């Protein structure tokens, strides 16, 4: 089900009639953009949002007929910022009968402060159902409400799994002399937010998998884009060798990507996945350990730090770092020379299994984040300097 959500604002001289061009075959001359958009989109439901002082009277005077007493009451109430949802109910019912689908009129505050802004989000979420698809029309809204509409789109997605398919704006101020008014689709801003969110997610947990889908939607060949998701999976399952092999395959496509949105974030993404360029497996694992330390993911940080130590020991003893038994042999040889790694092993096991170490000193390390960070930083310096 697709719902059109249209904002009503307040114009001193009423809504100005304009010829809105949606595409080559659809143009409508109307005073209220939302009604032309409804005809173009053919939604299953229409929600009209406005304040107690919005131009409900002007809108319903144009869109419905009859009930002159009700309209006079609405004119007086709108002029005094006293419109109520009860006053709007009968007008909405008649408009619904004309359109052939439900019309809901909902009063919202003016969004003058945080309390009113959050109230609008809460009321909008309450009016919608989970997994509903919506289109936002911000043409006649107060000038500050389109910014709130972007926040609403992200809020609804995460709180109610409601997908905002697009945002429309009838750009009256861009109308050429004697020409048609362009219709702008602002959904690209939602896609920009998806990229920003993906970048923030990566900085938090190191998962660059979401960029695969974003790159694909931005023009990258699907098979190439899926490699990025695959590489992220291998990295997050502690398999840097397979992660590196996959990154080597997809990295040139990421580095040269020139999609309209992807190129804004390309350099940052390249920088974040360049760990695989180190000369050997132990350097890859050290890079990953440092990166996960920065993200405060201490389980992965300790794991990659430990594995980097074992890999380096295997290389120095001419053993195969990709063979489990030979890695174990390399660790046993190196542990005698570097007893500190035993403490790292205990910490890694404690973090992985959720079991506190029996040794009081190791237990104190895990009792406080600063203690743990300092200890891991000390291991990094001692083991790899």
Image (cartoon, rainbow, N blue to C red):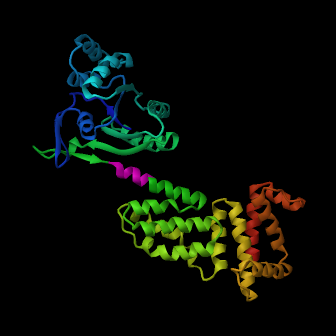
Can residue 220 be seen from the camera position used here? yes
Task: Identify the residue shown where x is 24% and y is 25%.
Answer: 98
Q: Is residue 188 magenta?
A: yes
Q: Where's residue 87, x and y in %?
A: 34, 16
Can residue 55 be seen from the camera position used here? no
Task: Identify the residue shown where x is 17% and y is 34%.
Answer: 17
The residue closer to the viewer here, 133 or 86, is 133
The residue closer to the viewer here, 15 or 71, is 71
Task: Identify the residue shown where x is 56% and y is 78%.
Answer: 277
Residue 99, quarter of the rendered image: top left
Residue 299 lies left or right of residue 231; in this view the side is right
Q: Where's residue 108, x and y in %?
A: 41, 27
The residue closer to the viewer here, 133 or 85, is 133
Task: Identify the residue shown where x is 73% and y is 89%.
Answer: 318
Segment colored magenta = 186-193
Residue 340 lies left or right of residue 171; in this view the side is right
Q: Is residue 361 magenta?
A: no
In the rendered image, which quarter contains the C terminus?
Answer: bottom right
For residue 50, above or below residue 41? above
Residue 257, quarter of the rendered image: bottom left
Residue 32, quarter of the rendered image: top left
The kind of secondary structure the magenta stretch mainly shows is helix
For residue 200, above or below residue 76? below
Q: Where's residue 285, x and y in %?
A: 66, 73
The residue closer to the viewer here, 334 or 99, is 99
Furthest-bottom residue in this view:
318
In the rendered image, which quarter contains the N terminus?
Answer: top left
């Amino acid at each position: 089900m697709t719902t059109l959500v249209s904002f009503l604002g307040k114009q001193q001289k009423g809504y100005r009639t304009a010829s809105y061009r949606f595409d080559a075959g659809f143009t409508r001359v109307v005073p209220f953009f939302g009604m032309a958009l409804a005809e173009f989109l053919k939604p299953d439901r229409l929600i009209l949002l406005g304040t107690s002082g919005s131009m409900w009277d002007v809108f319903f005077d144009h869109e419905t007929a009859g009930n002159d007493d009700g309209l006079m009451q609405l004119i007086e109430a709108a002029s005094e910022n006293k419109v109520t949802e009860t006053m709007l109910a009968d007008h909405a019912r008649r408009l619904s009968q004309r359109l052939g689908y439900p019309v809901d009129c909902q009063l919202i505050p003016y969004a003058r402060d945080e309390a009113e802004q959050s109230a609008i989000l809460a009321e909008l979420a309450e009016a919608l159902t989970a997994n509903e698809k919506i289109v936002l029309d911000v043409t006649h809204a107060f000038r500050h409400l389109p910014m709130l509409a972007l926040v609403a789109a992200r809020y609804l997605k995460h709180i109610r799994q409601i997908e905002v398919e697009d945002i429309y704006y009838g750009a009256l101020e861009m109308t050429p002399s004697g020409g048609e008014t362009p219709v702008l689709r602002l959904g690209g801003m939602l896609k920009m937010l998806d990229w920003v969110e993906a970048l923030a997610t990566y900085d938090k947990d190191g998962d660059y998998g979401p960029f695969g889908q974003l790159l694909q939607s931005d023009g990258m060949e699907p098979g190439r884009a899926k490699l990025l998701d695959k590489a992220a999976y291998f990295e997050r399952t502690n398999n840097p060798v397979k992660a590196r092999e996959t990154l080597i395959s997809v990295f040139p496509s990421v580095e040269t990507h020139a999609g309209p949105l992807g190129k804004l974030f390309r350099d940052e993404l390249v920088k974040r996945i360049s760990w695989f360029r180190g000369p050997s497996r132990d350097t890859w694992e050290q890079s990953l350990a440092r990166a996960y330390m920065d993200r405060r993911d201490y389980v992965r940080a300790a794991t990659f730090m430990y594995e980097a130590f074992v890999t380096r020991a295997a290389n120095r003893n001419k053993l195969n770092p990709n063979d489990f038994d030979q890695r174990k042999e390399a660790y046993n040889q190196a542990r005698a020379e570097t007893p500190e790694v035993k403490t790292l092993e205990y910490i890694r096991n404690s973090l992985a299994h959720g079991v506190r170490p029996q040794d009081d000193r190791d237990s104190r390390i895990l009792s406080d984040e600063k203690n743990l960070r300092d200890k891991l930083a000390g291991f990094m310096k001692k083991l790899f300097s």
